[in-house]
Structure formats: C-alpha cells, structure tokens
Image (cartoon, rainbow, N blue to C red):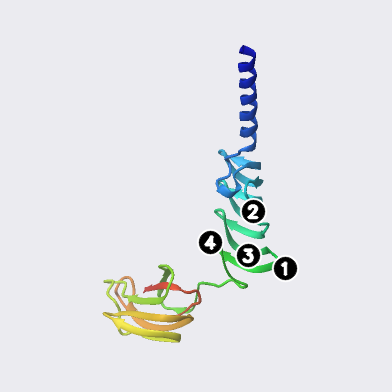
C-alpha cells in the first residue's frame, strides 16, 4: 500500500511539474497565456519574445503585452504583421484573413484593434497661426460635433466678436458666445480672426489661426492668447 501511495505522489508531482513548465504567466494577454520564450523584466515579458497559447505572437513585448512590432496569429489562422500597443493592433500593419476562397489581405492602419483605413488620418492640423493665439484641441469621444470657444486671457471671458469662416458641411449655432457646429461631415476647416488682450492686459493683439479637423468625433476647440 505504501508503494502505491508513493508512486501516486511521484506521478502527481511529475504532472504538476509538467504543468508548471507549460504554463507561463509572464504574458498578460489571455489568448497568449501558455508558454513564453524571451526577455523578461520584473516577471513580465519585456523585449523580444514568443508567446503561444490559444493564439501565438512573436515580436516586441512591454509589461507583458505585445507592444511594438510583431506577428500575431489567431486561433483561426488569421495573421497580422505590424504595430501593436498595449496588446492591441495600433498603427500600420498587414492583416491576412483565411477564407474559404483563399487568403484576403488588408493593408493599412489600425487604432485600438480597429481598422481605420488604407491611409492614416491626421486628427487635426493647425496653420496660419499669428499673434499670441494658443489653441487647445481635443476629442471628447465619438460623434460629429465641434464646439469652438475663444477666451480673452486677462479675465477668461468669451470673445464674441471674432470672425469665423468654416468650410465644410455643418449646422452652426451660437449660444452665449460659444460656437457649436453639429451634424458635421468631416473634414471641416475653420479660418478664425479675433483681437484679444495680451497676457499682461497692456495692449490688444490681432490673432489668426486656421484649423482643419479630419477625424470624426465630438471635438472641443479652446483658443486663448
């Protein structure tokens, strides 16, 4: 009986050892958890390596996730070669999809694992900036709106007599000095001219700026000298 128990313990120990050798938790993307061979920093994949689980990946890692350039093959045999960030396709790449009729190839740019097109879209561009205008432009999420506010730097009041000419399709309304452009079809461009105090409030400054927004979203433009 003792021999049987001893053999059972040895067998269980071997099974556990084999399991621990196969499972490697240095990779944080669940589809890649299984085995990992490559560089490690602080217990996580960092640098060059290969991870194999439900899916497989060979390339750059950062903090346990694909980050940089690499090749990713999913469980269906689809292969993506290109840029990653924090475990997601981000940037330029080539995706080869396996189909019944043969391979289908998609070339272009990805953003947060989503294909955005064959060419990279610059979210916004600024040109013809004169005076002391200081733009702050950001997207508040998905949508098709633009809010444009122009402030005087001395007392942060809204400037209501600016000249704003926009090129593109949108519905414009102004409420208490704030300019709203709704139902925008991007791209949309703005030519803006206005006068404001300098930061010290000692003189008036003529400001101009041209802004082109190409990427859809709910955009906010704050102009302050």
Which badge, 4 or 2, is on the more N-terminal residue?
2
Tell me the CA gap for discs 2 and 3. 22 Å
Which residue is tagged 2? 75
The residue most toward the top is: 2
Which badge, 2 or 1, is on the more N-terminal residue?
2
Which badge, 2 or 3, is on the more N-terminal residue?
2
Q: Can residue 54 be seen by looking at this rendering?
A: yes
> Which residue is depicted at the point 56% across and 53% down?
87
> Which residue is depicted at the point 37% across and 77% down?
148
Which residue is tagged 4? 112
Q: Are marks 1 and 4 in contact (CB under 8 Å)?
A: no
Which badge, 1 or 4, is on the more N-terminal residue?
1
Report the mark closest to the observer, 3 or 4.
4
Q: Can residue 206 be seen by looking at this rendering?
A: no
- Crowding at mark 1 (Cα within 10 Å: few <14, some 14-19, many 20+): few
Element under disc 3: strand
Which residue is tagged 1? 101
Which residue is tagged 3? 92
Tell me the CA gap for discs 2 and 1. 19 Å
> Which residue is depicted at the point 62% across and 59% down?
83
What x and y, as percent, mark residue 76? Answer: 65, 57
């Amino acid at each position: 009986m003792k021999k049987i128990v001893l053999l059972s313990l040895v067998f269980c120990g071997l099974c556990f050892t084999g399991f621990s050798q196969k499972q490697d938790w240095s990779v944080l993307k669940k589809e890649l958890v299984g085995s990992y061979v490559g560089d490690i920093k602080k217990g996580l994949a960092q640098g060059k390596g290969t991870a194999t689980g439900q899916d497989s990946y060979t390339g750059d890692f950062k903090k346990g996730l694909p980050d940089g350039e690499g090749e990713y093959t999913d469980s269906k045999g689809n292969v993506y070669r290109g840029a990653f960030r924090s475990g997601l396709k981000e940037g330029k790449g080539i995706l080869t999809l396996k189909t019944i009729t043969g391979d289908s190839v998609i070339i272009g740019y990805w953003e947060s694992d989503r294909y955005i097109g064959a060419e990279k879209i610059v979210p916004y561009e600024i040109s013809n900036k004169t005076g002391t205008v200081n733009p702050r432009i950001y997207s508040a999420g998905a949508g098709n709106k633009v809010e444009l506010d122009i402030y005087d730097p001395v007392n942060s009041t809204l400037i209501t007599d600016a000249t704003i000419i926009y090129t593109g399709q949108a519905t414009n309304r102004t409420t208490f000095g704030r300019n709203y452009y709704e139902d925008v079809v991007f791209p949309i461009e703005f030519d803006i001219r206005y006068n404001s105090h300098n930061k010290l409030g000692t003189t008036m400054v003529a400001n101009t700026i041209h802004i082109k927004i190409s990427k859809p979203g709910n955009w906010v433009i704050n102009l302050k000298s």
